[in-house]
């Protein structure tokens, strides 16, 4: 979950698009995102990102995943390598370290994108795309993101202030809005495909043809 899988990346994306607006709020508005980050929020998030590097946060992936699965044991089923294990049994597995590192590396990538909402949105959509086949949805992302805030608060101690926490909560709101909108688009597209298939099967031509065949077979 959350970039712990190395699935095929989706085609296209907006990551190289430069924001056309100066105001942070205008940038998010241009993307159709109601939640937003102001300059103070971005500064606090970037500041916390530097703190992550100071404590080598990416090396704390194992305790983060163990905590996550203790809080949400039902999410173990999304991990083929983990689903038959208990959270405590994950501690010594190399795969846990690899997954945990990738999750926390992805969080640092998100920090690097906060000054470019277009790039941030593209990154989040790519995450959703790569996790879709594993049936990981915004609900699971939300659980992990909220727990991540709690985790870094404990790891960073008093340096991680209430202002930092508030800024991260706003960032999580942005991420979840993008994820939920992407899920909605996929759902609408899927419904449209199904409706088209039904329309083709039950088209007037098919009905007439079926009726004619039935008539022709009548003694």
Image (cartoon, rainbow, N blue to C red):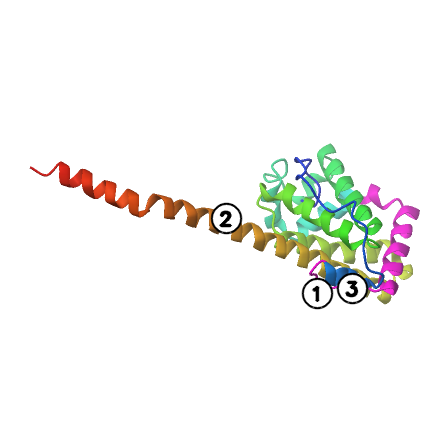
The label nearer to you, 1 versus 3, is 3
Of residue 67 and residue 178, the one placed in the foreground of this image is 178
Task: Please name whichever residue, 122 or 3, is drawn nearer the observer in this view of the structure.
Answer: 122
Question: Residue 171's quadrant in the figure?
Answer: bottom right
The label shown at residue 190 is: 2
Residues in magenta, as a range: 31-60
For the point 59% across and 38% down, the residue is 84
The stretch drawn in magenta includes residue 79: no
Sequence-earlier tag: 1 or 2: 1
Q: Secondary structure at mark 2?
A: helix
Q: Secondary structure at mark 3?
A: helix
Instruction: Residue 187: give x, y in percent of width and height.
Output: 53, 52
The tag on residue 171 is none
Of label 2 and label 3, which has the lower sequence position?
3
Q: Are marks 1 and 2 in contact (CB under 8 Å)?
A: no
Q: Is residue 135 above or below residue 170?
A: above
Q: CA distance from mark 2 to mark 3?
A: 31 Å
Classify mark 1: helix, strand or loop.
loop
Q: Main secondary structure of the magenta part?
A: helix
Side (left or right) of 107 relative to 197 = right
Q: Quadrant of the N terminus?
A: top right
Vertical order, 205 against 44 (above or below): above
Q: Using the image, determine if residue 69 lies above or below residue 36.
A: above
Residue carrying label 1: 34
CA–CA distance in space, label 1 to label 3? 10 Å
- Local packing at callout 1 (Cα closer than 10 Å; few below 14, some 14-19, many 20+) is few
Q: Residue 159's x, y, as percent?
A: 91, 60
Residue 177: x and y in percent read 67, 59
- Determine the CA span between mark 1 and mark 2: 25 Å
Nearer to us: label 2 or label 3: 3
Residue occupied by mark 3: 26
Picture quadrant of residue 146 = bottom right
């Amino acid at each position: 979950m959350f970039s712990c899988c190395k699935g095929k990346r989706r085609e296209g994306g907006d990551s190289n698009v430069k924001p056309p607006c100066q105001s942070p709020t205008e940038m998010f508005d241009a993307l159709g995102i109601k939640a937003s980050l102001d300059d103070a929020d971005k500064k606090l998030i970037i500041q916390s990102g530097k703190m992550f590097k100071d404590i080598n946060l990416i090396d704390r992936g194992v305790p983060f995943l163990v905590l996550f699965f203790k809080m949400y044991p039902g999410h173990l089923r999304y991990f083929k390598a983990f689903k038959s294990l208990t959270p405590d049994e994950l501690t010594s597995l190399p795969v846990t370290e690899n997954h945990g590192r990738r999750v926390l590396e992805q969080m640092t990538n998100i920090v690097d994108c906060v000054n470019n909402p277009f790039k941030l949105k593209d990154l989040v959509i790519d995450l959703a795309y790569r996790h879709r086949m594993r049936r990981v949805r915004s609900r699971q992302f939300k659980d992990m993101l909220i727990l991540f805030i709690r985790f870094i608060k404990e790891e960073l101690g008093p340096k991680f202030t209430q202002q930092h926490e508030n800024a991260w909560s706003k960032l999580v709101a942005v991420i979840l809005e993008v994820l939920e909108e992407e899920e909605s688009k996929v759902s609408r597209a899927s419904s449209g495909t199904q409706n088209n298939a039904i329309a083709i099967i039950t088209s007037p031509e098919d009905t007439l043809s079926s009726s004619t065949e039935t008539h022709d077979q009548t003694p």
